[in-house]
Amino acid sequence: MAELSDMTPLDERARILLKTLIERYIADGQPVGSRALSKHSGLELSAATVRNVMSDLEEMGFITSPHTSAGRVPTALGYRLFVDNLLKVRPLRGGLLKELKGQLQPDQPQRLIGAASNLLSQLTHFAGVVVAPRKDAIRIRQIEFLPLSEGRVLLIIVTTSGDVQNRILHTRRAYSASELTTAANYLNAHYSGLGFETIRERVQAELKQLQGDMSELMTAAVDAGSAAVQETASQYILSGETNLLDSEELSSNMVRLRELFKLFEQKTGLLQLLDISNRAAGVQIFIGGESGLAPLDECSVITAPYDVDGMIVGSVGVIGPTRMAYERVIPIVDITARLLSSALSSRH
């Protein structure tokens, strides 16, 4: 993600005019002319002086002139300077914060993740996205076996984040309830708190000392558990993508909009971008081409990581046009990530 230094060579007058232009454009969606800037900037400058400053800002790549208008609009570089150096993020108002807290109460992780995605979309009127915990972050808290019928055993997996997965194992012989309890106790005593890939490596070496048929049951359990984790990991829940159809900036280019929806369907590219959030602290903002994904060239993506008991496991985010109310969206993303962390971590 590109960042501009505080040493960007703009004097105070140019900064105020650029900030005013971007705020007016975000609010109205119309190119901003020198007369409007003179009126709203609070600076006592002549129209000619404003035009000269605008010309300098355009030359530096912060604003541009649409062909059909005498006014200017921000570029991605202008938005980046605005977000990094000029923006004052407002704290969430009490009612909004209360709504977020009320919706993100401790619950089944998948329901929580879905709720967070929906909330992000509803509160911002853009697309909300929440990435499920990464495969390497999913660890086992408890395993149970329940006999079903001849040759069938129900495997119940509870992860450290409180998610529950069920899988049916097909075995070559029937196991008694006491044998299943013994197998579950062994796995819980030796492998609780570990991921399935680590368990798999250790099982191969350690289970040789057990009876052959018990080893078969446990190996089957590890294989099924690993598959369950694979299915749920590295996925995301996307909500409100149709909100983007209401964006003038995006809906005016149907080819790009189709590319954007195709990106949502394929998932891989967007997951790679969102994974960057998992490796960074705090809110990350990707404006236009900074994402490295062509369908997002006219979009901004705002993300923040969430954790379970201090370990970052996934991220939340909002995808919308570059013309968005950053001062409002940034704290919504930040607080949602924090509340999701709290709800998942307090489950156990």
Image (cartoon, rainbow, N blue to C red):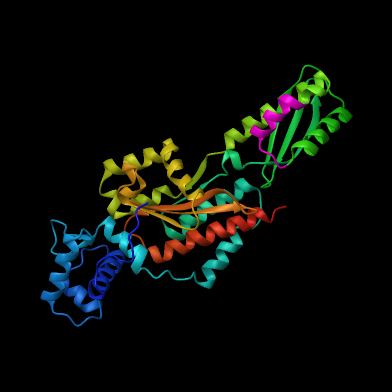
Vertical position of residue 132 compared to residue 287: above or below: above
Q: Position of residue 112 (x, y in %)?
A: 60, 51
Could you say which is closer to the camera, residue 198 or residue 98? 198
Q: Quadrant of residue 147?
A: top right
Q: Is residue 197 magenta?
A: yes
Q: Is residue 92 magenta?
A: no
Vertical position of residue 285 compared to residue 96: above or below: above
Left or right: where 5 falls relative to 220: left
Q: Find the residue positioned furthest to the left.
A: 48
**Do we see residue 152 in this rendering?**
no
Left or right: where 220 falls relative to 117: right
Vertical position of residue 104 compared to residue 239: above or below: below
Instruction: Tell me where the magenta segment starts and ends, as one range.
Output: 193-206
Q: Position of residue 18 (x, y in %)?
A: 25, 68
Q: Residue at x 71, y 37 (%)?
A: 157
**Do we see residue 134 in this rendering?**
yes
Q: Find the residue positioned furthest to the top.
A: 172
Could you say which is closer to the camera, residue 96 or residue 322? 322
Q: Find the residue positioned furthest to the bottom.
A: 44
Q: Find the residue positioned furthest to the right.
A: 178
Left or right: where 99 falls relative to 123: right
Q: Residue at x 52, y 40 (%)?
A: 235
Q: Position of residue 340 (x, y in %)?
A: 59, 55
Left or right: where 116 falls relative to 55: right
Could you say which is closer to the camera, residue 226 or residue 210? 210
Query: What secondary structure is the stretch in magenta mostly built from?
Result: helix
Q: Quadrant of residue 47?
A: bottom left
Q: Position of residue 183 (x, y in %)?
A: 82, 30
Give the mark count.
0
Q: Residue at x 19, y 83 (%)?
A: 44
Q: Quadrant of residue 102?
A: bottom right
